[in-house]
Image (spheres, rainbow, N blue to C red):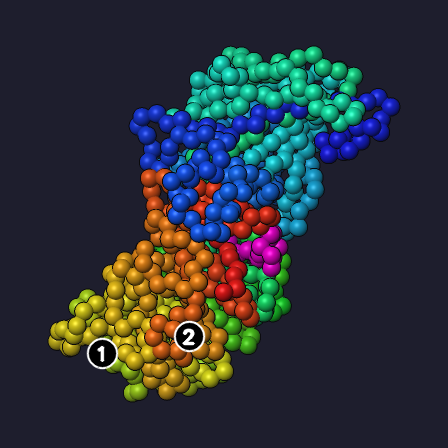
Amino acid sequence: MQTLRTLLGSVNSRSNPITVITLAVIAALLVQMTAPQISGFAPRIANASMADLNLDHKNSLTPLEKTLAEKADPNKLLNQTPMDFTLNQGQTDAHVKFTARGRGYGLFLTANEAVMTFRQPQSQQTSALRLQLLQANLTPEITGLDRLPTVSNYYVGGDPKKYRENVPHYAKVKYAQMYPGIDLLYYGNQQQLEYDFVVAPGANPNDIKMRFTGASKLRVAENGDLVMRVKGHEVRHHKPFIYQTNAAGERQEIAGRYILQPKNHVRFAIGEYDKTRELVIDPLTYSTYLGGYEGDEKAFAISVGGCTGACASYITGEVASVTFPDTTLVGQNGGTDVFVAKMNATGTGLSFFTFFGGPGNDVGRGIEADAAGYSYVVGLMGSGFVLPAGHNGFRTTDPSASSDDGFAVKFGPAGNLLNFTYLGGAGYDQVNAVVLNGTDVCVTGQTYSPDFPVVFAADTPLDTSYNGGMDAFVSVLSGDLVTLNYSTFLGGGNMDYGNGIDTYNGLLYVVGNTQSSGFPTSANAFDKTLQGFAPVDAFVARIDPKAGAAGLQYSTFLGGIGREYGYGIAVNKTNGQFYITGRSHSQGANASGYNGTTATSFPVTTATAYQTAQVGFGDVFVTRFNVNGGIVYSTLLGGSDYETAYGIKVSGANVYLTGETDSTDFPLVSNFYSDAPGTDAFVVRLNTNVAGAAGLTFSTYFGGGNLDAFDSVDSGRAIALAGAQIYVAGYTNATRSEGLFPITLGGVYQEDLAGGSDCFVARMTP
């Protein structure tokens, strides 16, 4: 017996001609809502064209989007993205042989059933539909076919014995001899799952019996569709399309239909065909808009490892844990896990995808890769992760069983776990950002732990005392994460957050925000006073880790009458000038501020700023400091609603930003994409050597807008530079087919939304 591909390629090579009968249920799930209707969904025809789906929206498209819309059938967008099947080597339930994820669903293949799970994005309820083969071989030989270059790594659940590395992916899965003379083949793409029954000459296709569990009210409609209910939704499999391929390769349609039997059993009735020839029965194509599978995925950081030009990119964030549902409970187990992925330079495939975490909620907040392909990830780790034997770190046991801790982890070029350390104490701790300084790993974050490790450091810290509330911290680890070279508290008596970090000439540059009037400032600070009515100011500090208690070279508040949040920092590596960005809420004239002081609007350089006054409820700010801490350039940037910048990079005097905006009038230059309902990501290039409006040399929306009842959310969270190339990562819940999220067609890794919220990775050259 041969696989389908071999069969079709050798039709004319046998003495006994082969006939292929393909029974294809070419059916997307047609969701017909009944009261009460779930918000965000509406009846739609699965095979509607782009014009049908976007009739009103199309008039607002840019010329590029119109061209794509006119040429693309939305139901074919994902057909070019192959589904991959991951071999189960112990990372999920032992009954499962292979797993896969499609658009809006998860798939688990066991010895004699396929389990599809899907979740509604609004209610987060998970449903399972099981397709079982009755009276079939309970122990078939199951093999993956057409191995793919992608591998996965799993360091989740807190038990090192269950961690798995280099787990392979395949394009197809074959079940041999499910029935006498009948093989089963699974394959497909991100839009649709298909499976074929390959029936040898003399075998009986009437042996094939299917049972649907998790579905109710099965019926065959007048048009021949198989209709069932799954959790209140109507699921419709189109009438079987059956044909026979003769020796000349011509398809001849053959009559066929579903036969319903008691207890949700289904068989096929097939008309007359040549029983001396081998045949293929291809019964199911699966597609759904029912919502995100296993929660949301979000990217928070990206790195290109010092590469210039077309580069692979390293991404981290959070992914909802994929769990196999048992018969009594369908849901996710273990909250969210950290993911680490390496995307190739063309965006067409992954070199590796690694899961990492314990039984709680775990998030990857920062990533930095080196030129050799090693990646360093930091973030937040829920309790319970256990480092497997043979791996080292400064602190390998959980310092607090009752609260979350920060962490740093090092992965090899294949995404394999090397070393790991917790970074925290008895209270809550979180690491937000990481940067490499030679072989050192430099991090920042915030801690509630009076016993946060500072006295263990090789170099004398700036501040050994916990100041109360929540303190920011700055720490430096060796490249193998085994030695804590430097660590210090940075804060006052209230809430202090370290959000971004960079290095230059051995110095550490940190940005964040503080509510502490006693936050340490330097003698040459631009502003030594906490401002505002509800005082939250950004801060920026420069620390010499070799200078001990005298190591605070520069530190200043930065804010006005409202609240400021500092999220990103970048140092110009040619002159030591440093740039910070975030969000400002300081609107209005000077007024009485915190503790009787005089508060002002956000400080801008009036003569050179792109925007001197706040336009909306919250605007982006960009401030450039010289090496002495003086402000060279400072501006606001935004529209009439809210804006936040999270990521910043610098090249010369050019600042590159990404973030999110709710404004329909966000300032644009050479805009690629139209504004869409909800929150859009943005990408900006600002020349800080050019005064006024001319300094904004590139600014574009980067997002989509769903046509459903809820608005989309697109957020740019991180940015990287590789020569003239800009790399951006974030997350979105906007689809490509409906919401026109800007995805390039023709072979990228994934061409449409697969879950309630998915990561995005983009490369552009303004």
Q: Which residue is mark 2?
A: 687
Nearest to N terminus: mark 1 or mark 2: 1
For badge 1, the amino acid type reads: Thr
For badge 2, the amino acid type reads: Asn
Apparent side of residue 142 relative to residue 608 in the rendered image (left or right): right
Judge by depth and name the residue closer to the eye, 418 or 192: 192
Residue 180 is a magenta residue = no
Residue 204 is drawn in which quadrant? top right
Identify the mark at residue 529; answer none if there is no mark.
1
Q: Residue at x 40, y 36 (%)?
A: 120
Point out the stretch of residues depicted in magenta: 337-352
Vertical position of residue 594 compared to residue 311: above or below: below
Assign a secondary structure to mark 2. Answer: strand
- Categorize mark 1 by other alpha carbons within 10 Å: few (<14), some (14-19), many (20+): many
Judge by depth and name the residue closer to the eye, 28 or 395: 28
Q: Residue at x 23, y 68 (%)?
A: 586
